[in-house]
Image: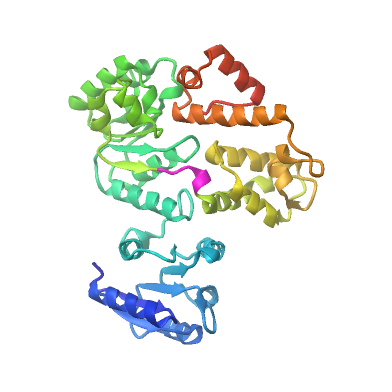
Amino acid sequence: MLKGFRIALVEDDEIMGMSLVQRLELEGAEVIWLKHVNRAIGALRTPRAPIDAVISDIRLPDGTGEELFNTLCRTTTPPPFLFITGHGGIEQAVRLMQAGAADYITKPFEMPVFLERLAMLLSPHMQKELPPLLGISPAARRVDELALKAADEDRPVLIRGGAGTGKGLVARRIHEMSERRSAPFVTVNIAREPDVGATLFGPDGAIERVGEGVLFLHALSRLPEADQGALMDALETSFSGRVIASCGHEMTEIVAQGGFRADLFYRLNMMEIPVSPLGERTEDAVWLMGQLFEDLNARRGTRLHGIGRLSEEAVRAHDWPGGGRELRSRLARGIETASGDLLQPSDLFPERITQGDRIMTLAEARQSAEKKQIIEALERTNGQIGQAAKTLKVSRTTLWEKMQKLGIVIDTD
């Protein structure tokens, strides 16, 4: 698995170090084991032979892995770094990822998982140094890896994820890295099309325009039954392009209940890329806020000095039911209305402002609980109000009125 690779291990713990050295050598790698920051700086700055990757603990006897990485970055471009950290050091590891480190893994870890993450660093694709697409968490980097794998193949791809998780970004990266990149990338957002059949199959429709390119079908579960058959026929006969589709996590249930043709679903699901909710990837939420901040702040008359530390904690604590779009919306509004020099939690979450230790009233508690349940129902039904109303056992009209009152907007992107 690792034959021909030269790996530096920076680890002072004898048991951990010996275990890793033995396994890496068993996999065919040549390992240079270093136990101190000072010795590692010299060995990595002027190695006798090229180093393909560095595995480094963050806590070391004479310093930290972060100091080692930053020192090397001042004078050279270091090899890809895979940091090992305890749960208490995740924040530091995230900071290192933002500074250019390749990945991190938390202790305790399983050896197969560790080897898989190391292999990602050493793969030719990782050496292309593509910027992170959805974030810096292990889950986001896994999506990057699967997207690159999909780009090397030509099978249909199904991208699963909730609202605002970046499914369209994943589809476009697959296209841009594939051999079809010079051909058209045609998007059809089924949830927004009043006549899906005409958009897909009409004169100058998507099927005709895509040619040898990629047809991206967003919100696949919304495809009308009649158009499902037409799409199946096209795929089996005249279509010469590639299909990438996206849907919510409830798609399997919809197929099982007969709401979508099983043969078409499995025809499009030859390779699946799952995208986890932003609320489960807290470090990605903070990363995304940092990515968006400069551009949004530049539009403000008097720029903010930065993002307050408490704001980062508040972002980590939020569930982000609206995904990246909710984060962008809150950030844009917060930057525009902020009164201080730094962006504070009250700017991002004005609804949380309280007076002293005031307890939420029963009416406020009911509204908060209703809003949470409605959002969850809409996510599970991919924004279909009728199905969400059935799930919540209310009429469609009642659900719509509550959504208006609570400020819930359907995400059709």
Residue 162 lies left or right of residue 158; in this view the side is: right
Residue shown at 53%/73% (left/top)?
A: 66
Q: Is residue 278 magenta?
A: yes
Tell me where residue 128 appears, x and y as whole percent.
37, 60
Of the pair 44 and 213, the residue shown nearer to us: 44
Q: Mark yes or no: residue 46 visible.
A: yes
Q: Residue furthest right?
A: 356
Relative to 21, does residue 249 appear above or below in the rendering?
Answer: above
Relative to 206, does residue 337 appear above or below in the rendering?
Answer: below
Q: Write down the region rendered in magenta.
A: 275-280
Q: Is residue 173 magenta?
A: no
Tell me where residue 315 appears, x and y as whole percent.
61, 48
Tell me where residue 86 appears, x and y as whole percent.
49, 67
Q: Mark yes or no: residue 335 visible.
A: no
Tell me where residue 381 appears, x and y as whole percent.
44, 26
Relative to 313, does residue 67 appear above or below in the rendering?
Answer: below
